[in-house]
Structure formats: C-alpha cells, structure tokens
Image (cartoon, helix red, strand yellow):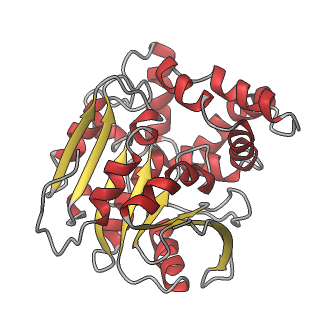
Amino acid sequence: MASTVRTDEVRLPDGRAAELWLGGDPAGTPVIFFHGTPDSRLAARSGDAAALGVGVRLVAANRPGYGRSDPTDSDHLSVADDTVAIADALGIGTFGVLGMSVGGQYALACAARHPDRVTAACAVATPAEVPALVPPLPRDGLDEEGQAFFARLAVGSVEDNVAAIGPDFEAYVAAMAPEDPDDDALAARLVARLPELDRRLVAGLPAHETAAAVREALARPDGYLRDAAIAFRDWDFSPTDVRCPTWLWYGAHDPQAAVRNGVWLSERIPDATLVIRDDTAHLGTLLQHWPAILATLAQPWSGTSRGLAPV
C-alpha cells in the first residue's frame, strides 16, 4: 500500500489560512504533529513510512507565521483551538497529538485544552515550563550569558522577547542563506550546525528534502519569533490538566532539552511515562524512533486505561 502524501490548506474560522502536510495511512488512526522551531510541517515527512506501517493518518500543520500559514498573535491555547478547527475541516473526531521540541508544548496544550478530542499525547525533546525548573534553564552547561538570556525571556513581554531574539535570528537566517538554489550546499550548512549524533542522521536524508524544509522554516520570521518569545515564559495552561495517556521521549545526550525537562513534566502530568533514549541527541529522539512513537499513539486508548508502551 502506498502513502497518499499531499499538501493542503484549510481556512480557519477567522479566515486565516493554515498550511498542511498529510501522509501515512488515510484510513488510519489520526495523529496531529506539531513541528519544532524554526521548522515546519515538512518535518513530518520523515515519519511517513512509519505512519503507514503502523496505521496512522499523520497530519502536520504550519503554525501561524510559518510557510503559507497566516501570522497572528498566537499562544499555546490559540494554536490548540486552531488544531481542533483543522481536525474539524478534515473530518477528524478524536486524535492523538505528537510534538517535537517546542512543538511538544503545543501538543500538551492541545491535550489540556481539548480533553474530549485528544486521546493520547507524545512530547519529544520538549522544553518544560522553564521558569519552574530548577535551575530555570532548559539546557545544561550554559555559560553566564546563556543563563541571563533565558532569565530575560522568562520575565519579558512577548514584544520585548521578540525584540531581543530578532537580531540573532536575522543573523542565523543570513548565515543559512535559504534563498540559495543549491540544495546540497543549503543542506550542508544545516548539518554543520547540528550536534554530532544528529549530524549523521540528517546527513543521510535527501538533500532536496532538507533544503526544502529549511526554506519553508525560514521563509519569514513571524512564526519563529512568536514561538521563541513564548516558549520559555510561564505557560498559559497547566500540565496537570493533561489527563490522557502521555509519553515523554528524551535523548540522553540532547543539548537542547535536558532530560530533567521530562522529569519535571512526568511529575505533573497524571498519566505520564518518561522514556529516555541512550546515545541520542535532539533530532534523533524523533528520527530514530518514529515507529515506536506512532505505534504508541495508534493504540485504541479509552479514558486513562493504559496498555504497554512499545519501546
């Protein structure tokens, strides 16, 4: 059976466009994927074969300000509402949620906001509610400048945080040069910035796919700046409100989201399982484990009745 991968666009209730990627088994269990930052719906492509294999209908949407999704003053809960509107437009009733990195925050917010629609949740390499962590940092080994940066984001307004983050992001985009038509060169620039464990994985992906993902992720700054401005402040939802079966997947060697983020979440989400992957960095926590993660979400969950998680 071949996947029916396609792109699409839906109109949200307020008229904004939401750009989608649709893959996996069209008759399978629906799972909605929340990409990291800066990234896009195209990150779901690496899970297409796994989704098809385990019977998952995989749906990914660009958050506001990414790709052709219209920008707005979004937050965790507004994205959760957008997600339910997308599900409605696709004729999806209940669904699982899966979020990568910062996208995991949105997946958990959707589960907390819409418990009648979300059957199970997976957050992969996700920063927890950073101001509540001890220490209040998502990463280990930060120097004084890095610690001060996250301290400013924790208390800054969204507007102040956008202003603080903007120059560095502009410099990053300029260095990546997403307008470069040379797919190999663009993919190589991304790979060079990754930790060694992730570098090997991404270097093995088709360069044209990696380049397309970079171009879409960096096409405009709105999505990234909004994500980064709210990701490290107090959340507008509580993880204690996530009542569905939830899995928290972390890499033991992840420089972006230390395992203690997962420990913090597992202590607050009532029905949570923490899975730590050895010899895994950030991206590999998802890229190397798509089948197990999607198989978990594909199970026929009912209420909080738990079966065995495929690990």
Res 17 seen here: no
Nearest the eye: 163 or 254: 254
Residue at 51 percent across and 80 percent down: it is 85
Residue 132, image quadrant: top left
Q: How many marks?
A: 0
Q: Residue at x 28, y 74 (%)?
A: 115
Would residue 76 be found to the left or right of residue 188 on screen?
Answer: left
- Give coordinates of residue 300: x percent, y percent: 23, 72
Note whether residue 271 is visible: yes
Kindly indicate the quadrant of the structure image that contains residue 62.
Answer: bottom right
Residue 60 appears in which quarter of the rendering?
bottom right
* Position of 42 relative to 210 (above/below): below
Residue 28 on image: x %, y %: 41, 73
For this rendering, which residue is in front, 249 or 230?
249
Q: Residue at x 34, y 22 (%)?
A: 279
The residue sitting at 53% across, 29% down in the picture is 201
264 lies left or right of 95? left
Q: Which quadrant does the C terminus fall into?
A: top left
Measured as percent of width and height from the top left, residue 286 is found at 42, 42
Residue 287 x, y percent position in the rendering: 46, 40
Say above or below: 45 vs 200: below
Q: Is residue 64 above or below residue 175?
A: below
